Amino acid sequence: MVSAVIAVLCAAIVVGASFALFSQNASVETYLSAGELSAALVRTDLSGQFVDKNGILGTETTVDEDVNLTALDNTTNAAFSFGDDVSPVYNVPGVWEEAAFSLTNSGNVAFDSALQFAFVDEAPEEGTPEYVLASKLVVTVSDNTRTLKTGTLAQIISGGVIDLNARQLASQSYVFKIKIELPYESEVVDDGTGSTIMNANLKFTFTVTATQTVEDGAITE
């Protein structure tokens, strides 16, 4: 009997040594989709007093045509009709153009928007016709409720970034206008003997930037 008991205990020990700890695994699938910051800039219309092919300043007219500026080469002069190197328009005092733009959030990330003007090349040298023209052209940036900035082109460029609209949600559109005017100065005759703007060729550009909106500031453009 003792031998039999010992044999049973040995068997029990062998079996006990083969036990494993209980365990269980749970897998959870996680899906993360990155958002898209996308903005579309469209010129919706263009008003002004334009110069015809004969150099005559006409009456106020409006060009009611949508131009998708986002889809164009950024060297294309499509926002205004002042002309370019290929097809120059010889502008005179009294000319002005005001373009209306629609900025649409076509992505799914809220953004803030800003505008900045710059000379295409280096800033014109003091005393040159281009320098004088930059100090005479008047630029006004506005939206449907307020004037955001106004001043000469030289002042607008030196002033830096102009805030347009904060927290523009997906599918929302924001309309703003840019007016560029060469005022007619009835008491000043530009006869080429003084500070003249005649034959000036001035190139400038403006950039609209959409920047991701976050609570403590913008971090992604």
Image: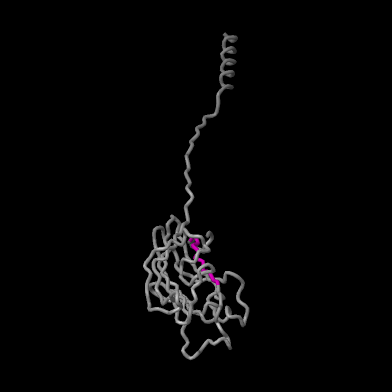
- Looking at the image, which is closer to me, 52 or 122? 52
When asked about the image quadrant of residue 174, the answer is bottom left
Location of residue 109 in the rendering, given as x and y in whole percent from the top left corner: 45, 56
Q: Residue at x 52, y 82 (%)?
A: 136
- Residue 101 percent location from the top left of the image: 42, 67
> In the rendered image of this protein, does residue 144 appear above or below residue 173?
below
- Give the magenta part as a residue range: 203-212
Q: Position of residue 25 (x, y in %)?
A: 50, 34
Quarter of the image with the N terminus is top right
Position of 9 relative to 168 (above/below): above
Q: Residue at x 43, y 61 (%)?
A: 68
* Secondary structure character of the magenta stretch overall: strand
The colour scheme applied to this rendered structure is one colour
**Residue 143 image position (x, y, % from top left):** 41, 72
86 is within the stretch colored magenta: no
Say whether residue 172 is left or right of residue 36.
left
Q: Quick check: is 209 in the magenta stretch? A: yes
